[in-house]
Image (cartoon, rainbow, N blue to C red):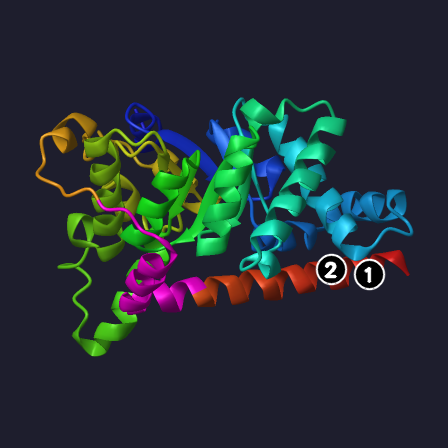
Amino acid sequence: MNQLEALKRWTTVVADTGDFQQMEQFRPQDATTNPSLILKAVQKPEYAPLLQQVVAQGKGAEISALMDQLIVRFGCEILTKVPGRVSTEVDARLSFDAAATVARAQRIVALYRAQGVDTASRVLIKVAATWEGIQAAGQLEREGIHTNLTLLFSRCQAIACGDAGVQLISPFVGRIYDWYKKQAGAGWDEAAMAGDNDPGVQSVRSIFDYYKHFGIRTEVMGASFRNVGQILALAGCDLLTIAPDLLAQLQAASGDVPHKLNAAAAQGMALERVHYDEAGFRFALNADAMATEKLAEGIRAFVADAVKLEQLMQAAAV
């Protein structure tokens, strides 16, 4: 048995890509996208016709509407490749506007429904885990629109998401690892900080244990991996969303995958329940330099790629 199949015994495997033609070989349950992944996909020759079709069909529409039509088109194609859900992201420029996030999410869901997609079971709306994003997600969940809270780097973000009743969170393993490695500089010991000692792995494990201890129903999906070791150290997490190159490495490697994260064991831990109001959340996030910096950096990067995607669409419309 290869490691990918072995991992699937403990964890739901999700493909982290907009390249839907690449997915079938790995047989993931779900798929996740974001502006950067869609931008990467549309620059491949095989996806150029899809971009042209969306632009032609939406002629005269404002650019934000065209963007939503494009990401939903990708989402619909992905849903023909996976049996489960696709995550589709709200424009990161709305990360600090709860009302606008809700409105944009509702528009995306309406586009999916117009294509006959059962959004309650097959679509997750991705929203940045800012305070405003979490509040928007709570409102969407109450409307029956399920959400995936992304750009999540800290326990306080995870706790607020659990209290808001969001469907799923995506803590970013690799970006946490990146921050601590950069901070350590020449003093970083890759071997000593690998696997269970990886700071990104430890962050996800802490969140997983907290949720399972207190019976919080929000799903935990580790994301943003830099190497296979990080993935294997989180076997047993509810879900793991993995880029195609790492899926290929897992598929090519033989051997067992030990069960690492255990919900039953978490229930016996001595943990304190925490709740945050807005002021408490902002203070806790501010106190975590890594989470503050990576959240801001992540929003900026997604916005930059969304702008590039819009520019490609505008060029195609000429």
Residue toward you, 225 or 251: 225
Please tell me how crowded label 2 is: few (under 14), some (14-19), or many (20+) other residues with Cα within 10 Å.
some
Q: Which residue is mark 1?
A: 314
Residue at 40%, 45% in the rendered image: 170
Check the picture and name the quadrant holding the N terminus: top left
Q: Is residue 292 magenta?
A: yes
Q: Is residue 90 visible?
A: no
Q: Is residue 243 left or right of residue 87?
A: left
User: Does the rendering let one see residue 15?
Assistant: yes
Quarter-of-image position of residue 106: top right
Q: Residue at x 88, y 42 (%)?
A: 57
Main SS class of the magenta portion in the image: helix
State left or right for residue 241 relative to residue 307.
left
Which quadrant of the structure image shows residue 105? Answer: top right
Give the structural element (helix, strand or loop) at label 2: helix
Q: What's the mark number on residue 310?
A: 2
| Marks 1,2: beta carbons within 8 A | yes
Position of 54 with respect to 44 (left or right) is right
What amino acid is found at the position of numbered circle 1 in the picture? Answer: Gln
Q: Position of residue 280 (x, y in %)?
A: 31, 58
| Nearer to us in this view, 284 or 79 | 284
Residue drawn at 20 percent across, 38 percent down: 209
Packing grade of label 1 (10 A; few <14, some 14-19, many >=20) is few
Q: Tag 1, which secondary structure?
A: helix
Q: Quadrant of the C terminus?
A: bottom right
Whether residue 24 appears in magenta in the rendering, the answer is no
**Highlighted magenta segment, given as a residue range:** 274-295
State the image coordinates of residue 49 (x, y, percent, origin top left).
80, 45
Q: Is residue 130 above or below residue 258?
A: below
The amino acid sitting under disc 2 is Glu
**For the point 36% across and 33% down, which residue is it?**
219
x and y percentages locating residue 242 in the rendered image: 42, 42
